[in-house]
């Protein structure tokens, strides 16, 4: 299973940017996605 | 294209190959060749993930689709942000901490060798078949647009990509993707700006949007619950969500990009970067296509967008052609007048405009029937030729060459990721697992480069022969959706439940593939649903088999 040339263990302790927690970032992504969908719906139905 | 356009295109081709070779220098081991030494930052990986997904045919196809049909295709990406969050929570940490080169390698740790081999084979089968089409489709469009032979465009796109991927591996792929994505973004904004600037002075953006809305081209949200209707809100949100889960979570061409991140945080951020930007980017591309549609109300569009087919039709000179052409020109004139009346304050003219617009469509349909008759009944579709034709005819000197370079960039960024991932799966899941596991770094690197060359050559070979396959091409192009469901189902069993056994995953995977084959051959269900249904079938059947299997025997 172990292939040759495996790199040293990666650092997965980088600080979580902006919101400080992954939960905060995921919530922001979901809120933004819903907002974008709402804006697209508004754009489609807007009485130009 | 004038000399300046050719110079821009030539400069792009030379510069991107040179840059790719330079960026990928110094590979000594296969972890450097396949995973860029796991030293990449999130923004570079994120742009590479985006570039791998946006193929040339996506770029010219979606603008053309917006021109002919509107922006409904946008819903296909609605599930993407949610899929990215789920992947960041579930499989990305599993892959990262398992220290794997391929997504399928993880399955041997979780289940057994045969499940890993089956899943990797499904990937090689689906991706390997479609990579030739990924090369052929834009090459065909470019050959018509630039007046070159298909062989020339196939060898130019495929050959130049092979050169830098063989030399620099994943580091070349990622860094060239970054440059190509910057060029693509610039091209998108450029086309969008030019399309707005070229509207008549008395006809503003608001009028353009009102006109497009009247024809239904701004409609995105179709709440129909139908499983057979294309691009409904639910097929995009639910079906698209599962397609994105499978594509970004289980397709090696994407997994390999984010495994190159310098940490788990960097890998996660690269996917979330796409979650934020993908829908707005597709929105801009589609809206550009809609604006091109409005633009051609005030400029004369050709009867057929494929110039080669138009010349063939003129050479055949069917007796109906002059009448069809006269009808088309008269309809265009009437549509222009109706659009002029349809300016602000003139909205009651909508009915007259719609009637004129339908007459244009009817005249064009007559022309298409003539082409199909001349070609012995072969189906004609020129959607992919609309945007490149618009670019060459209407963009200023130099900029047209740049946008053609953008189309090349989109093609090459996808191909590079696919060549690299196909070589990785073959090397890690088969060569190092079954043929020679203890090779030296130099030997492994040499074999990896040979495999990259073989897959690149295979893609060129398929692309060169693709014209003979006719309508089978469309089927092959959708092949990804035939294997994504079972692959996703196997990964769901691996990650979501400890109750799944190796036997359940293997036989559940085969049973799920059988379900998808049945859907393809025997049901009218739209392909956006295949992944969800296939994955659900694997999950349910796999769990049922696992429940009847003693843990010690099956796991």
Image (spheres, coloured by chain):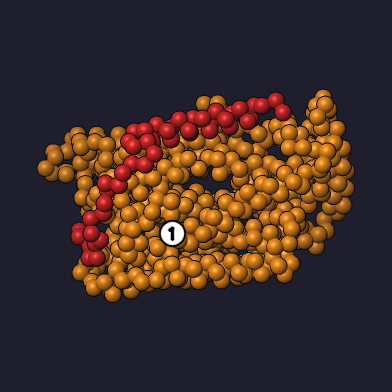
Chain colours: A red, B orange
Q: Is residue B162 above or below residue B499?
A: below
**Number of disc labels:** 1
- Left or right: residue B251 versus residue A35 is left
Report the residue marked by disc 1: B174
Which image quarter holds the N terminus of chain B?
bottom right
Q: Nearer the viewer, residue B296 or B68?
A: B296
Q: Position of residue B98 (x, y in %)?
A: 24, 50
Can residue B415 be seen at all in this image of the molecule? no
- Left or right: residue B168 versus residue B320 is left
Which image quarter holds the C terminus of chain B?
top left
- Left or right: residue B447 versus residue B48 is left
- Left or right: residue B455 versus residue B358 is left
Identity of the residue drawn at 82% across and 36% down: B339
Q: Secondary structure at mark 1?
A: helix
Identity of the residue drawn at 53% across and 63% down: B463
Which chain does the numbered disc 1 sit on? Answer: B
Examine the image and state in which quarter residue B360 appears. Answer: top right
Identity of the residue drawn at 33% across and 46% down: B265
């Amino acid at each position: 299973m172990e292939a040759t040339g495996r790199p040293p263990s990666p650092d997965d302790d980088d600080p979580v940017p902006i919101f400080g927690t992954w939960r905060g970032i995921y919530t922001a992504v979901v809120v933004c996605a819903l907002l974008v969908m709402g804006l697209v719906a508004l754009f489609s139905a807007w009485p130009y | 294209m004038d000399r300046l356009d050719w110079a821009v295109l030539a400069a792009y081709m030379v510069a991107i190959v040179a840059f790719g070779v330079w960026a990928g220098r110094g590979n000594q081991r296969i972890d450097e060749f396949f995973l860029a030494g796991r030293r990449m930052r999130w923004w570079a990986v994120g742009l590479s993930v985006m570039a791998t997904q946006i193929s040339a045919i996506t770029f010219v196809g979606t603008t053309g689709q917006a021109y002919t049909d509107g922006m409904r295709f946008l819903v296909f990406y609605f599930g993407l942000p949610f899929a990215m969050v789920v992947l960041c929570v579930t499989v990305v940490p599993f892959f990262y901490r398992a220290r794997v080169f391929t997504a399928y390698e993880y399955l041997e740790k979780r289940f057994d060798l045969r499940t890993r081999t089956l899943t990797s084979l499904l990937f090689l089968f689906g991706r390997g078949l479609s990579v030739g089409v990924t090369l052929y489709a834009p090459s065909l469009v470019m050959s018509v647009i630039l007046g070159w032979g298909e062989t020339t465009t196939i060898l130019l796109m495929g050959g130049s990509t092979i050169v830098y991927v063989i030399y620099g591996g994943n580091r070349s792929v990622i860094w060239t993707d970054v440059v190509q994505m910057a060029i693509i973004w610039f091209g998108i904004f450029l086309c969008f700006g030019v399309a707005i600037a070229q509207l008549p002075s008395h006809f503003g953006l608001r009028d353009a949007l009102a006109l497009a809305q009247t024809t239904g081209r701004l409609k995105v949200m179709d709440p129909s619950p139908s499983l057979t209707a294309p691009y409904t809100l639910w097929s995009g949100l639910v079906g698209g969500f599962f397609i994105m889960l499978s594509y970004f979570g289980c397709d090696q061409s994407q997994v390999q990009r984010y495994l190159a991140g310098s940490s788990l945080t960097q890998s996660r951020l690269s996917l979330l970067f796409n979650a934020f930007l993908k829908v707005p980017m597709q929105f801009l591309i589609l809206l550009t296509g809609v604006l091109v549609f409005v633009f051609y109300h005030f400029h004369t569009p050709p009867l057929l967008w494929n110039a080669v087919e138009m010349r063939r039709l003129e050479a055949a000179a069917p007796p109906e052609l002059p009448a069809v052409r006269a009808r088309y020109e008269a309809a265009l004139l009437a549509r222009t007048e109706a659009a002029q009346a349809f300016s602000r304050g003139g909205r009651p003219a909508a009915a007259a405009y719609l009637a004129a617009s339908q007459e244009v469509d009817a005249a064009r349909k007559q022309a298409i029937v003539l082409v199909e008759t001349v070609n012995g009944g072969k189906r004609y579709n020129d959607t992919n030729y609309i945007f490149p034709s618009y670019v060459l005819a209407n963009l200023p000197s130099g900029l047209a060459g740049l946008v053609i370079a953008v189309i090349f960039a989109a093609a090459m960024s996808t191909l590079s990721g696919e060549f690299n991932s196909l070589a990785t799966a073959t090397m890690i899941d088969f060569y190092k697992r079954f043929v020679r596991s203890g090779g030296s770094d130099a030997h492994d690197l040499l074999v990896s480069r040979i495999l990259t060359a073989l897959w690149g050559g295979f893609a060129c070979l398929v692309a060169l022969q693709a014209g003979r396959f006719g309508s089978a091409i469309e089927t092959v192009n959708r092949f990804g959706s035939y294997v994504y469901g079972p692959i996703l189902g196997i990964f769901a069993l691996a990650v979501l439940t400890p109750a799944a056994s190796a036997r359940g995953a293997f036989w559940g995977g085969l049973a799920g593939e059988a379900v998808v084959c049945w859907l393809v051959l025997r049901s009218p269900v739209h392909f956006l649903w295949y992944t969800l249904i296939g994955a659900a079938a694997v999950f349910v059947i796999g769990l049922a088999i696992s429940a009847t299997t003693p843990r010690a025997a099956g796991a």
